[in-house]
Amino acid sequence: MRRVAAEMRKVGFDEVKVDPFGNVLGRIGSGPRVVAFDAHLDTVDVGDREQWTCDPFGGEVREGCLYGRGAVDQKAGMAAMVYAGQAIRQLNLAPDCQVWMVGSVLEEDCDGLCWHYILDEKVLAPEIVVSTEPTSLRIHRGQRGRMNIMVEVTGRSSHGSMPHLGENAIDKHVGGEEQYCREDRGWREEEANQAEDNSDHAAQRDDPPLICKNFA
Ligand SMILES: [Zn+2]
């Protein structure tokens, strides 16, 4: 964030600020129309370093390509925005606008929270926001929206060695056996006939079913 702010100042942005959430915002122009571009500055984790063929934080350039964590998602967008801002200013491309280049934070973990803050706290009130998420240099339609839904489902608990005696709440309500019970479907059908007679049957089998091998 400090690096981006310094670069914005270096290339002549009219205003650079950091909001209390941690987003860095740079402005070009002072017209009445408000347009914003966004790139998130955070990245997902590096993961297993053994899988990398370069230093994920090295910024290595090979044959004209930059390698490192976040090079595509989404440092490149941020870098392009800063220098697009410089060009817009120098060439006076948007005389009726104030163009804000926003480096947002916490996108990977809490998608949308950064812009929720910007809009809710009236840090900016843009007419339009252009996301510079990587799209292979093509224009993509954004998401149609997002909903957080709390669903309460009920089941019946049972010991892990005898799941057929309980009711899996997820099975009952989300996708059912098609998604979650492929391995134990046959076993359930077989066991269902015997379970009522002997609840210890599953633990005493000579040839336990797959689900017992995996999870018991
Ligand atoms: Zn991204």
Image (cartoon, rainbow, N blue to C red):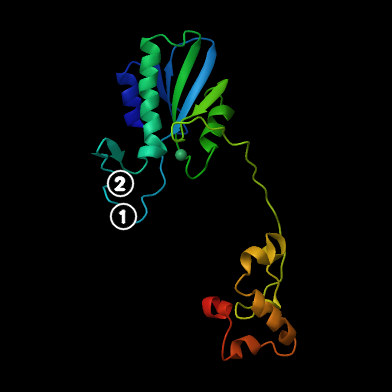
Task: Please state the horizontal and vertical placement of residue 111, each as a whole percent of the image.
Answer: 53, 41
Marks 1 & 2, CB-CB < 8 Å contact = yes
Q: Which mark, by number, is residue 211?
A: none
Say what secondary structure mark 2 lies in.
loop
Q: Quadrant of the C terminus?
A: bottom right
Q: Callout 1: few (<14), some (14-19), or many (20+) C-alpha neighbours within 10 Å?
A: few
Instruction: Please determine whether, in this image, residue 45 is positioned above or below residue 60.
Output: below
Q: Quadrant of residue 174?
A: bottom right
What residue is rendered at 42% in x and 46% in y?
Answer: 44
Residue drawn at the location 46% of the way across and 31% of the way down? 132
Going by the numbered disc 1, the residue's amino acid type is: Arg
- 24 or 21, which is in the foreground? 24
- Is residue 116 visible in the rendered image? The answer is yes
Q: Amino acid at mark 2?
A: Pro
Q: Residue at x 67, y 48 (%)?
A: 149
- Name above or below for residue 183 compared with residue 195: above
Mark closer to the chain start, 1 or 2: 1
Residue at mark 1: 49
At numbered mark 1, what does the secondary structure look like: helix, strand or loop?
Answer: helix
Q: Please tell me how crowded label 2 is: few (under 14), some (14-19), or many (20+) other residues with Cα within 10 Å.
A: some
Against 210, is 99 above or below? above
Question: Which mark, residue 56?
Answer: 2
CA gap, disc 1 and disc 2: 8 Å
Q: Quadrant of residue 119?
A: top right
Residue 148 in the image: x percent, y percent? 64, 45
Figure quadrant of the N terminus: top left
Percent position of residue 212, x then y: 57, 80
